[in-house]
Image (cartoon, rainbow, N blue to C red):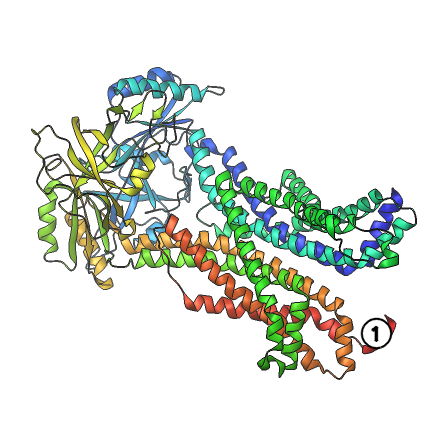
Amino acid sequence: MMFWVRMAMRELWVNKGFSLFFVLNLSIGLAGFIAVQSFGRSLDRHMDKNLREILTADLVLSATSPMTEAELALADEVLGPDASKARLTAFYTMIRPENSGDSRLPARLVRVMAVDHAYPLYGRFVLENQTDPALLQQGPGLFMTRDTALTLGLGDGEAPSTPLLLGDKAFHIRDFFLEDPDKSLTAVDLAPKVYMGLDQLDGTGLVRFGSRILYFYFYTFAQGTDIPALTRELESRFFDLSQGQPRINIFDTRDVNRQLGRLTGYFTGYMGLVGIVALFLAGMSGAYLFRGVVNLKQKEMAILMSTGAIRREIYGFVSLQLVILGTLAALLAVGAAFLLMPAFPLIFKGLVPQDLVIGIDPVTIGLAVALGAAGSLVFCLPVFVKIFNIRPLGLLRGLGRDGDGVAGLTRRAWQAAAFLPGLGAFFAVSMMVAGVARDGFIFALGFILATLILSAVGSLVFWWCKPLAQSRAVRRFTAGRIAFRNLFRNKWSSLSCFVTIALGVFLISLIPQIQKGLESEIMRPEGLKLPVFFLVDIQDEQKQPLIDFMRSQPGDLTHISPTVHGRISTVNGRPFFEKNTGNTRRSEGGPGRMRGRRLEFIFSFRKELADSETLVQGRPMASTPWNFNSGAPFDISMAVSFADRFDFKIGDTIGFDVQGIPLTGRVVNLRKVRWNSFQPNFFLLFQDGVLNDAPKTHLGAISNVGPDQRKDLKNSLVDRFPNISVIDVTQTAGTILEVTERLSLSVRFMAWLAIGAGLVSIFSIARHEARKNRNQINLLKVLGCDFFTLRMISLVEFGFIGFTASMFALGLSAGFSLAISWYFFDSLWQFDPWYFAGILVLATGVCMATGLMAARQVMHARPLELLNL
């Protein structure tokens, strides 16, 4: 045994070039995968450790209106007298400093967090001046960040004395918080948070009918309390109390873990999938290098067999070498992952906790070593078929002879079967990393499909190289003629380079095309004009005064839309909610869950569709107002996305509870809504006449306001209508695009890592081919070929590979990205020729430089070496 170990180590040392590049290839592919997995596990550990701090409680109740005395009494009865309680009321509104002289300081949207004296139950405020948080309850004061104060024009000194207006009441900044208890992670923050005392809401005039306000009730319990059991009992009791129409959401740490796990899973899942591609490219290169070594060592293996070595020992000898190389690659990859991981908090800044501690745990290291050792064997398994066919008799009649007849068919069947473990492992790891088996399977299937397409295209390209080398145009160019002949003669090595660079370019160009379409659609939606401001919580009695006010102001007030809150009670005669089963139809909560789901909806009505809506199925709603006394269901227009989420279809009869009044409607059409229009859009539109007399609020939009007029208009609106929230659409769209850019950056980061693995693969393959063809190169030099011609041969070879691979990969990525955009983003796709041209030129140039560098050492060898062979 030790003899074979020593021999394996000696062989690896003798073949230092193969060992070095095999380890380097595999380690680069593994490094990205390990870094992503370690980042994801670090994030999961942080979430598991801080679930209660993230929720700021053990259990939370939330509703869109204050809980009634009966509901509070029921909660106290179920949760027990020993539970600690706290309250928070949250909503968006405008804040701005009072006028100072003639200067008008800016107004901006904030999220008000009105808390009582017991908040937070878990977590704490970290304040610059260590002010007692209880001061919020003793007078009209605020906690905010210093950045928020700066955006309000209050300077960067101590807490300013300038009062801030929230509605009709003036507040002073008590302190600046560096850290607040609310640790919830959201993809987009519409506005910064400001904290105030709950009792200080009185006198602001901000809590009105129809205002979008969330009321939170926090509870903590003694250690060892069965919180899931309390949650189930509360759900059941609230269901009975509301007579089957629950209006209170119940959250516990399981919901936080599930929500945050879904959020972080998007980050790590798709980055991990791209990391698998880098590993796949590295494995392809490693298998090719191993194939070259096996071809060169067949004679030695046959000699060993003829001198008494049994075949099992030869297999073990080669397998041991691969395991050693794979283990070394895994250890090197772990070290590289330590260098890569600090980049992730920077990429996801604002999307992950600031105090996240990242590290590589023993489980990830073990997984890396297993992938390195086992992966080397799996990737190289097809090459083992060559070893199976080695016979000592081959020494006498020549090696590398293909079998024919039944033996040849058997050999080819074994070769085909040898690819199955690798494909199975690729699918299994993809499904594991994606988190959702279906997504991982689709990704792996799509990637395999892209690989097969590119392989087929590459085979045709290099088959075409033979007639191309014989064409009249190329025959006059010596370097080109030799280069194209080399490409045809070395089809397998050329195809390996082709597929490697094509897959890397495919990944790099895929995501930015989708992002470009999203960016254009968000900022400049085709056929639509983005408003400048979006107005929320316009009271019914304020509608006409607002219209009159805007007549004397710059800008156009458009799309004023009524909104009415209500609930869905029945669908086709069956309850929309059923006890202990949640929604009987498909929903974001999933079967059997009501916790964390949306229990109330916003309805509206209009006589005709807006320019951001398109009817896709069914008939238009009746133009005549609905008659309450008719007894017939009114018409409903439903957004396609809402119908898909809850499994509605045209013809469904839906019962509603709108402010205590039962109503029945029927779905008559489905419409596609372009939510990126930032206009008032709704999931459900009712027929005219249903909600006209119901108490309601309104939404609106303002457009055609110059940049230099926006601040004054916003301040004037806040002065005249302090309860109306003014959302800056351009700022919100920019925030969405910033998040999109960060997510795109994460995928591009891993795609460039895949390209890095591909370039190392190309360098390794090019170096191997140059060493294999050193006889030809030296012979050309003996025949008088100069260095310029030799360099041109290498440049033409790898330039042709890089150009054709990039060109076909870009075309394939355009098709894939168009399909993805059509399926997921309603065809939000845009072709960017300059981006394509840049990638084509860059990939071709890098491929040429890599190939030239790899062949440089052989080209500079002396022709005298021919005599030593």
Query: What residue would you read off at disc 1?
Result: 865
Quarter assignment of residue 315: top right
Residue reaching furthest to the right: 307
Which percent across, then down, holds residue 189? 36, 46
Q: Residue at x 59, y 71 (%)?
A: 799
Between residues 176 and 239, which one lies in front from this camera angle?
239
Between residues 170 and 233, which one lies in front from this camera angle?
233
As drawn, 364 above or below 779 = above
**Residue 288 appears in the rendering:** yes
Q: Residue at x 32, y 43 (%)?
A: 194
As drawn, 60 above or below 534 = above
Between residues 305 and 510, which one lies in front from this camera angle?
305
Left-right relation of 358 to 623? right
Q: Residue at x 7, y 28 (%)?
A: 629
As drawn, 538 above or below 247 = below
Quarter of the picture holding the N terminus: top right
Left-right relation of 536 to 327? left
Which percent across, then down, holds residue 795? 63, 74
Quarter of the picture holding the C terminus: bottom right
Q: Residue at x 59, y 45 (%)?
A: 426
Judge the density around disc 1: few (<14), some (14-19), many (≥20) Cα neighbours within 10 Å. few
